[in-house]
Amino acid sequence: MGRPKRPRAADYGVCILSAPEPTSAPSPARRVAQAVDALRHGWPVKIGSAPLLLPVETAPETGAASPRMLISAARAATLKLVNQAPAADGHSPVLVRAAEPLTLADARPVADPALDLVVPLKGPFVAEPIIFLPEAEAALELARIAGVLPAFLFDPTGAGEALCLEASDLAEWADPERLTIATRARLPLAACDDAELVAFRKVDDMREHVALIIGQPDHDRAPLVRLHSECLTGDIFGSLKCDCGPQLDAALALMADEAITGGWGVLLYLRQEGRGIGLINKLRAYRLQDAGLDTVDANSRLGLPVEARDFATAARMLDLLGVDRLRLLTNNPAKVSALEAAGLTVIERVSHELPANPHNARYLATKRDRSGHLLG
């Protein structure tokens, strides 16, 4: 058998925005899903009229090269490629030019902090103005969604055919109103045998969020609600580096107590690992933390946002469940603000503080001191 043929952009249908039959063109949200898939495969993308972009982390070695790279401001500042001022919004894009064309092998040390002390940078670099700013911002956001490092060869030679989309497509893909309830089922738990699991799905988004309803819903009584973002290491493996697992267990226990007294609870389990940067990038951040950085600085060194969670989706889930008033179990004021901004009424913030251990004490202090989390 011959080698499997790599799919072409035309096979996806994303470069036919001007096709004679508009119904044959994919929707904006579908184009985003296809672009995310392309980045994970290492294929180039083209956003609007901006030049072609090739993802540095995942692209195969095909001889592609360019003197310019698109990276985040935080990563550029870490490498001292630009002034610190642009890093105020660390996830904003920066376009840098090297003296000579960069191959993918040359570009990867610019993208990956694991190589910071191993491979010398091929410079010098200078920052250039970004003419296609919305498209550049969309590229970094696509990389975050795909879970790859936010770094691209900019307008490289030899990159091949690109998948095409528009910067505005991301708004439709992210629209929480597209989320619907897919199914629901009774799920007895160790914490409470009177529970139901409700699954939510959005077309063109592979993440499937769930809500765990504990006790019998009584819409005359505001439920105790917890927004819990997925944490494989803490929820499943019992990691001591964070407090996610203990927070999850404690939330279920508190909701079970509510059910005993006639109340009810809703735990939203949101599929946004690593505060929205993905599992692989979270583990990369863990390695940087082991080298001495805190959570905030580790994400910045990767060129990723410190906080990229989507609480608008949580508000949509509650709306679909018929919840408009709630008591929110959290130490994070940003969650309260996000739900209230979506039109929900948070009648009480219920503290959710658990004891530290020697492995997560610095993590908890960083959440308090640099991320605005409250004590008690």
Image (cartoon, rainbow, N blue to C red):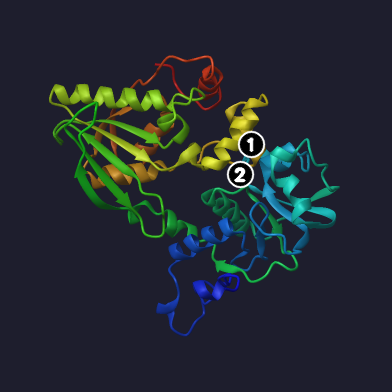
Residue 349, visible in the rendered structure: no
Query: Which residue is the site of mark 2?
Result: 91
Amino acid type at circle 2 is: His
Q: Is residue 201 above or below residue 350?
A: below
Identify the secondary structure beneath mark 2.
loop
Apparent side of residue 14 relative to residue 62 in the rendered image (left or right): left
Q: Is residue 77 above or below residue 376?
A: below
Q: Position of residue 134 (x, y in %)?
A: 59, 57
Q: Position of residue 171 (x, y in %)?
A: 46, 57
Residue 376, visible in the rendered structure: yes
Q: Nearest the camera: 53 or 131? A: 53
Query: Callout 2 environment at 10 Å: few (<14), some (14 to 19), or many (20+)?
Result: many
Query: Which residue is the site of mark 1?
Result: 300
Q: Name the residue located 39 percent from the left edge and 38 percent from the top edge.
A: 338
Quarter of the rendering occupied by the N terminus: bottom right
Q: Name the residue located 22 percent from the left edge and 25 percent from the top edge.
A: 256
